[in-house]
Amino acid sequence: MSAEPHEDSYYVASANDDPDYPRLDGDAAAQVCVIGGGYTGLSAALSLAERGMSVVVLEAKRVGWGASGRNGGQICTGFSSGNTKLETWLGRDDARKLFDLTEEGKAIIRERVARHRIDCDLTWGYFHGAGKQRHLKELRADRESLARDYGYGHTRLVERAQDVRDYVETPAYLGGLYDGGAGHLHPLNYCLGLARAAEAAGVKIFEGTEAVAIEQGAKLRIRSHRGQVSADFLVLAGNAYLGGLEPRIQGKVMPVGTYIAATQPLGENRAKSLIKNDIAVADCNFVLNYYRLSRDHRLLFGGRVSYSNLMPSNLPEAMRRKMLQVFPGLSDICFDYTWGGFVAITMERTPHLGRLGTNVYFAQGFSGQGVAFTGIAGKILAEAIAGQAGRLDLLARLPHTTFPGGRLFRTPTLALGMLWYRIRDML
């Protein structure tokens, strides 16, 4: 095996295959070098190869090793920031264009899964559970705005607690919003499928190949420990794991730890009694719980966040307490797997895309919406490299504040700021 194995998780245990791409040993050349073998990097590489360009992907660990292979698998609608903020920053017309990009991101998933025969349990249907009247009021307003201002008619408001059980069997919600245009998938299998598609299109993928330095210039040189790539263009797609490779964008994102647990198999009848029609579910808290069923009838339950590099103590028990708040009838059930990893968030909770100079492009900070948006992000970067930068320029107009505190103090500063949202979730 050429690289460090994936972290243990249910996704790794249920992966369709375990491809082994070589390390870069020596020199290579391509029109475009992509750093990062997750959704964004592979999507950009595939889009570029489909345009006839030569592409090399450098992945420090394994394909899908980071958030792309560990996340909750939820395909969400819109941006985490909400559309009202987009309208404030850019105006209604451009906010609508950005929302349409998120819908195109969903369509890209659907199209690629079908065209490349990616077996990743893609399923549509999503329920937002309202635990408070405040949440229900917010969902009602969101639904009205989505239909009126954005032409999105896939939602249904659920205003009675007894009707929640048509979607999910829990006492935790007094209502909610069903979104038929959102859904879920097996994230690692989707990522591995993208890698196979990119390789088939001519992309060269190297695992266990960390980019350690970038030499700028008309011809870029990206150095690893055992070789280098010369390229005309560079795509930075390391997201939460890019580290300090490019200091000019490092401070715009914060790596945040997120965690998921997978129960033992529940059996088909019991699993289907908890969540109807195999939909994904999430609550409306700022620090939210999200969950869904697996193909083999486990409950995959996500929640908790951390702002340090340390795994929370006694994570399985903490996750189990959260699960029992939603499904008290699962008191006899244990977890077979618990795992976590980093996602990258921005201060404004919108993706951060742009260019540095004339030939370095980047995409990062998907802020919880990465499953849906990374596909369109990669496509937009490919468009820009090919000379069609209009959609990248629109995204680059979004404001992105540098996290305060610098490298040493930005994590504790963010943790202190998040305390307000945790308190608000409890009110």
Image: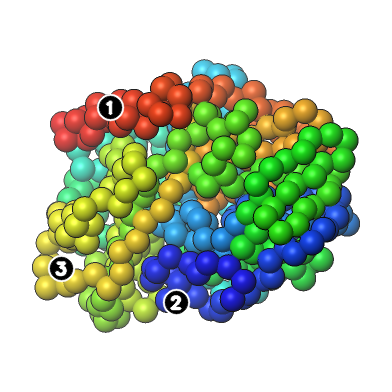
* Residue position for label 1: 416
Q: Is residue 66 left or right of residue 262?
A: right
Where is 251 relative to 126, above or below? above
Q: Residue at x 30, y 52 (%)?
A: 311
Between 147 and 391, the one lying in front of the other is 391
Q: Residue at x 20, y 48 (%)?
A: 173
Q: Does any portion of residue 83 appear in the rendered image?
A: no
The amino acid at mark 2 is Ser
Occupied quadrant, residue 418: top left
Between 94 and 72, the one lying in front of the other is 72
Dot placed on the residue nearer the N-terminal end, 1 or 3: 3
Dot placed on the residue nearer the N-terminal end, 1 or 2: 2
Between 278 and 303, the one lying in front of the other is 303
Instruction: Give the label, 3 or 2, closer to the camera.
Output: 2
Q: At which x and y percent is residue 410?
A: 40, 27
Instruction: Give the label, 1 or 2, closer to the camera.
Output: 1
Determine whether label 1 and label 2 are within 8 Å by CB.
no
Dot placed on the residue nearer the N-terminal end, 3 or 2: 2
The amino acid at mark 3 is Leu
Q: Is residue 219 left or right of residue 380?
A: right
Where is 396 relative to 42, above or below? above
* Residue position for label 2: 14
Please give the label number shown on residue 330. Answer: 3
- Say which element carries label 3: helix
Determine whether label 1 and label 3 are within 8 Å by CB.
no
Q: Does any portion of residue 389 appear in the rendered image?
A: yes
Q: CA distance from mark 3 to mark 2?
A: 23 Å
